[in-house]
Image: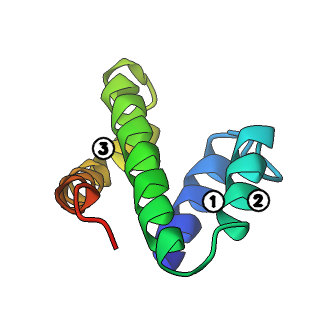
């Protein structure tokens, strides 16, 4: 994960792409909701949130075909396989309750 952040920072600096300075209001609410959940219920809620986030990333990555800047496009596409594998693994776990 740390290397992903370093690579993202490098690409954003080289191409003057502004990264968000903080979490969005939606992400902050989702984080607060997760903090309120206790014990085994947390694991299931966290899993569902991760699946939702991965599905969103897949949709956004599919839009990469429209990116004109090749280094930015390569950065986005390079993580697609990992995101897809994680999404499939999460989807397999989704039906399992704690």
The image position of residue 2, as x and y in percent, is 53, 77
Number of other residues with Cα within 10 Å of mark 2, as a class: few under 14, some 14 to 19, many 20 or more: few
Query: Circle 1: is it few (<14), some (14-19), or many (20+) Cα within 10 Å?
Result: some
Can residue 70 be seen from the camera position used here? no
Name above or below for residue 34 compared with residue 13.
below
Q: CA distance from mark 2 to mark 1?
A: 26 Å
Label 3 sits on residue: 77
Name which quarter of the figure residue 8 lies in.
Answer: bottom right
Question: Mark 2 or mark 1, which is nearer to you?
Answer: 2
For numbered disc 2, what is the local secondary structure? Answer: helix
Taking depth in this image into account, of 54 and 64 the one nearest to the observer is 54
Residue 44, placed above or below residue 14: below
Residue ID for mark 1: 9
Disc 3 is placed on an element classified as: helix
Quick one: label 3 or label 1, which is nearer the N terminus?
Answer: 1
Q: Quadrant of residue 92?
A: bottom left
Q: Are marks 2 and 3 in contact (CB under 8 Å)?
A: no
Question: Which is closer to the viewer, label 2 or label 3?
Answer: 2
User: Callout 3: few (<14), some (14-19), or many (20+) C-alpha neighbours within 10 Å?
Assistant: some
Q: Residue at x 77, y 42 (%)?
A: 24
Name the residue beneath numbered marker 2: 32
Alpha-carbon span between mark 2 and mark 3:
31 Å
């Amino acid at each position: 994960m740390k290397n992903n952040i370093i690579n993202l920072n490098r690409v954003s600096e080289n191409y003057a792409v502004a990264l968000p300075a903080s979490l969005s209001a939606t992400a902050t609410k989702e984080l607060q909701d997760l903090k309120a959940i206790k014990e085994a219920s947390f694991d299931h809620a966290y899993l569902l949130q991760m699946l939702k986030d991965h599905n969103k990333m897949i949709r956004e990555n599919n839009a990469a075909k429209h990116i004109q800047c090749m280094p930015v496009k390569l950065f986005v596409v390079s993580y697609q396989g990992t995101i897809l594998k994680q999404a499939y693994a999460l989807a397999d776990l989704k039906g399992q309750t704690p």
